[in-house]
Amino acid sequence: MKNSNILRHTALLSLGLSLSSPLLAQEDPAPPQPEKSVFDGDYLTAGVGVAVGPSYEGSDDYTISPLPVVLGSFGGIDFQPRGPGIAFDVIPDQDGAKVDFIFGPVVRARFDRENSIKDPVVRSLGKLDFAVEVGPFAGIQVNRVLNPYDSLTAQVDVRWDVAGAHDGMVVYPSLTYFTPLSQGVVTSLSFSGEYVDDNYADYYFSISPAGSAASGLPTFTADSGWKNVSASVLTGVDLDGDVTNGGFSLIFLGSYSRMLGDPKRSPVTSIRGSADQFFGAIGVGYTF
């Protein structure tokens, strides 16, 4: 879900106020006072869901797993989920700004082929260590693009593994359009990709002579390049129809990813898996 969640909530707050503020029929009306919103100042959204996705990158076997979600704002610092990880935007948003800037640290864990490998041939290659990727992310968000409450966000992560697993680098650009559909329903459409260096590609997609002997797959050497491109749709539904007062909400996520380059050509994908990758999730969250 790779976008500025606090700015979404700001847009939703504006929408809620515009729909709920009374029109005062007076000759010299006083400006209406905005109602208190859960998103004024510090707030936290915590949730849990169920996700269905490939058992490893490039797999055509699917597994079910829990999906915890935490996002919010504290002291002007926004935090948002990043896969199994978190990103912190340390640049405070400006009320009413047409353009907002995004910058901060991001950390992401990667458990690919560390467990849940359903394919016995790929499992014979051996389990891989889990990676911890750390680095900066930066971006820009344009508000009020097509209506008073939408936004378009472009941002990029640059992360390096610090856990000694793939020891490589991942560059993750994304573009997200967000808009409310009503006071209680919001949706976003995102496009993203991942560029990986030689270390990452070799760790996850190369087949060594020893691996070939154990699995029967041909040897393969994977080099750097674009690993995949993805498109995703996220929809949130507030259960009482008003997102500005917090409480419970449902979240629906669906995405499609296409493997590219050597990750697509690797035997773990081309012989034992598929270049087409699908992901879906449903969850419930609570905001206070």
Image (tube, rainbow, N blue to C red):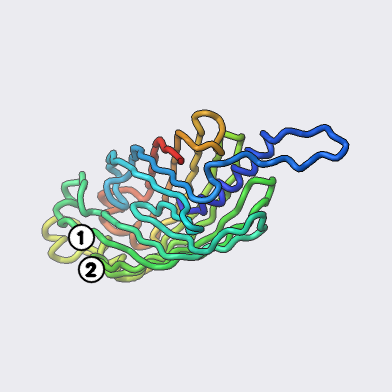
Of the residues shown, which amino acid type is indicated by label 1? Answer: Asp
Tell me if 9 is positioned left or right of 57 in this view. Answer: right
Comparing 94 with 258, the one in front is 94
Query: If you read the primary sequence from the N terminus, does the residue marked by circle 1 or circle 2 appear first?
Result: 1
Comparing 172 with 264, the one in front is 172
Q: Which residue is mark 1?
A: 129
The picture places residue 153, in percent across and down from the top left corner, at 56, 56
Of the residues shown, which amino acid type is indicated by label 2? Answer: Gly
Comparing 244 with 271, the one in front is 244
Residue 233 in sight from this viewpoint? yes
Considering every residue shown, the one lying at the far top of the view is 240
Q: Which mark is residue 164?
A: 2
Residue 195 versus residue 269 in the image, above or below: below
Residue drawn at (50%, 53%) of the image = 3
Instruction: Determine the secondary structure under disc 2.
Output: loop
Mark 2 crowdedness (10 Å alpha carbons): few <14, some 14-19, many ≥20:
few
Q: Quadrant of residue 16?
A: top right
The picture places residue 88, in percent across and down from the top left corner, at 44, 60
Residue drawn at (21%, 54%) of the image = 114
Residue drawn at (40%, 54%) of the image = 82
The answer to whether mark 1 and mark 2 are in CB contact below 8 A is: yes
